[in-house]
Amino acid sequence: MTNPTARLAAKLHRRVCLVLTEDAVLAEELLARKKLASEVAGRLSERVLLIRPNRLDSVLDELKKMGHTPQVVARSPG
Amino acid sequence: MPPISETEEWSDRVREVLTRYPEPLLRLVAGRLIKPRLNQPIDELIEKSVSTLGNPPIVDRRIRELPPASRKAIALIGLSRQPRWKVGHLITALSALGHPEGFAPIEALLEAGLICPELSPHLTFPGEFAAWYGQAGTLTAMVFAHPGVASRARGEDLELPDLSDPEHETSHSFRSADGLEWPLRLAAVWQQVHAAPVRLTLASTLFKKDQSRLQVDEVLASPLADQLAPAPDGGILALYWARAAQLLEDADGELRASDFPTAWNTGLVAVLTQLVAALPHVETWDPLAGYAPSDNGLSPFPSASLLALLLCRKAAVVSPAAIATWLWEHHPSWAGTLPTSATPDRGAEWVHNFLLGLAFPLGLIESDGEYVRLSALGKHLLAGGPEPTAPPAFPQTLLVQPNAEVLAYRQGLTPALIGMLTRFARWKGIGPACTLELTPEQTYRGLESGLTLPMMMQTLNRHGTRPVPASVEDLLQRWSNKRERITVFSSAVLVEFPTPADLDAAVNRGVVSLRLTDRVGMTADGTEPGLSQLRLLANRDYESKPQRCVSVAEDGITLIVDAAQSDLLLEAEIGRFAEPAPYESPGVRRFRLSPPFLRRALEQGLTLGDIDMWFQERSGGPLSATGRLFLLGPKATAPTAENLLVVRLPSAELADGLMQWPDTRRLISERLGPTTLSIEPEALGPLKEVLAEVHVNLETAAQPGEILANNP
């Protein structure tokens, strides 16, 4: 049984670039785009695509070419 | 007086420059500025010098002590409202004012501590100002004046003549512009740059494609609303002016949109003051030629345009031709840059275009179309007049039409509203009534700039003469929702927990709010969560080199992940060719290579080389033999199963002998191992006979198909 006040063991992954889609179908649609798929390092879950480091700009360009208007959450400190 | 925050910023700049002066020069400058009685420490001298610049009585005294040319130079800086000037432009303007002494008046100001050189962070200050001027380059060296000094110098007499034409003083009716024309055009160019940054050449000039685009753009190249004179290449002027006014910024060789300066939320006078102040930094535009980049000389525009405005100060009414004549006779370089077609009227058209095409729409002057005089704003900025009162406000000035077009009546526009509209509605026409268009792209850009849909709706409703039509509200809602479909986190912090139960606990405690996988979570905005409730096992930087964190079990199938060393890329990458194995113990993650997963990886474009490289990086060795069997087996020639007679020898030496002796070698099909050979069934008899010759007895073993060779 987990102690409800104990600190939770965790590992932090910093400076991660990822795409979060509204649903799994949209993620599939993105992965079906060859140029975009090549920038995807992997699929963390049905709706979450992990982008290769330093490939944000080309991902955004490609999303816009596909007619999407992604919400970009900018770089956070740390 | 300049705002306090601005003064502090300039004080910091002065402090930074003084810190870089060598001690003898600092003592010389501080000696003239603060006249210390004792041999004070350096730090104290710097602080006292900086604070003196904010002391009006002392500054006034120091200005009075300067030679006339230096007084005029600091007055020019003050009147221009631009603290940063190229030394070359100041020298040119001083020459026109009858002081052709070159760098000496500027050097006197530098030594008096009333202006500072802009020092390159990459170069050492050479120790004296003349050497610095040579080092920085006569075409590029810049100085700046603290606002506390510049503002005190505005009253100095520049000894400019009164060019009034009394005959026309009372016989003409003068009109003024609303001052919005250039703010609107600068906002429109900001919008275009926001959509697509403009790349610049190394010389900060435009590439042909952008130049042509700006020259024919339907909004930027359109005639001015109340045009008394043309502004050739007005789109390019707007671009460089917006850059000088800090609406655009240079980044990585291109111009990008910055946030609107705070003056845009202050009021029209503040914005116009800022635009006037930016003019000395517009060097690639000419009132006659339009776009006029120059890479081998100083543009006469900054000095000539300021002098042209200042020549209106004393005159009640003046003709552009009279100003042109004065410039023709006094400005050292202006006449030489005019085209030959401008020679007969001594550049009157240049001055006409500048005053009526640029200064009139800016609201600096009033005109009857032929003669000009300073407006209330012009008198405020250039002649020490009171700040003009703000025009009456008409907050309801927008009309949103069902086709998503917005009519904006100018009388109600303010810089703040222009700035707001620019962020989410596309400028379509700038005229007596302006038109904008609500589009999906521009709505998206507005949202990306930090606006929300309610903020856009509030702007349109608050300033609208009628409520926003429901159909337009629906459109905006739909465009806004579309943006919510995909969120890109450019640099998020993800939190990985050892078990799904831990992630549940973290969500319950509010440490993270988004579940990305069964064990990985994130805060809503991707920022670092509060660490007080976490015990960090490891910290991984996603942009650094991947670490070795996988070991392959003996079976060649099971991949064991070192949880402390692993990163998210591993989780994502490993899933391409292995499936997670059930949890066996906390903190130990196992995956299994499986033929379907490996086949799928190949179908998705990975090669054996890619997979080998991944295993090399993550485990230190290539793909296991089992993995290779899974991958290569299906593509290899089909293996065969057949009945063989196996000859088993008691030692490898005897097997070697059989392989080497030609009489036995020809009867052997294949060596299977160190002590085993295979033969065809029909070779059994001949082999027995040959071996019998050397007294080796070949026996049939208990196992079917296996034969033992023994010495007798």
Image (cartoon, coloured by chain):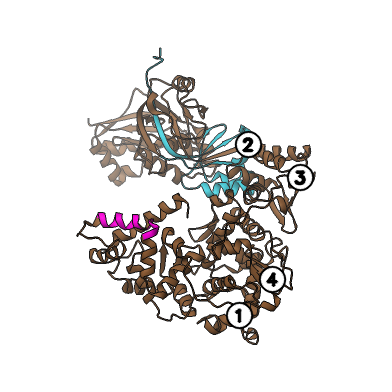
Chain colours: A cyan, B brown
User: Are discs 2 and 3 less than 8 Å apart at CB?
Assistant: no
Residue at the (22%, 60%) spot, across then down? B37
Q: Nearer the viewer, mark 3 or mark 1?
A: 1
- Whether callout 1 and callout 4 share a subunit is answered yes
Residue farthest to the left?
B39
The C terminus of chain B: image quadrant: top left
Q: Nearer the viewer, mark 2 or mark 1?
A: 1
Q: Answer few, some or many: residues within 10 Å of disc 1's Cα (few below 14, many 20 plus, some between 14 and 19).
A: many
Residue at the (23%, 38%) spot, across then down? B653
Q: Nearer the viewer, mark 1 or mark 4?
A: 1
Q: Secondary structure at mark 4?
A: loop
In front: B311, or B535? B311
User: Are discs 2 and 1 less than 8 Å apart at CB?
Assistant: no
Ranked by sequence position, the earlier of labels 4 and 2 is 4
Q: CA distance from mark 4 to mark 2?
A: 47 Å
Q: In the drawing, what numbered circle is on residue B324?
A: 1
Q: Which residues are magenta?
A: B43-57
Which residue type does callout 2 highlight? Arg
Q: Answer few, some or many: residues within 10 Å of disc 4's Cα (few below 14, many 20 plus, some between 14 and 19).
A: some
Which residue type does callout 3 highlight? Val
Q: Chain of mark 2?
A: B
In the rendered image, the vertical position of residue B105 relative to residue B555, given as above or below: below
Residue farthest to the top?
A1
Q: CA distance from mark 3 to mark 4?
A: 31 Å
Q: Secondary structure at mark 3?
A: strand
Q: In the drawing, what numbered circle is on residue B485?
A: 2
Residue at the spot of label 3: B400
Q: Main secondary structure of the magenta part?
A: helix
Q: Secondary structure at mark 2?
A: loop
In front: B449, or B104? B104
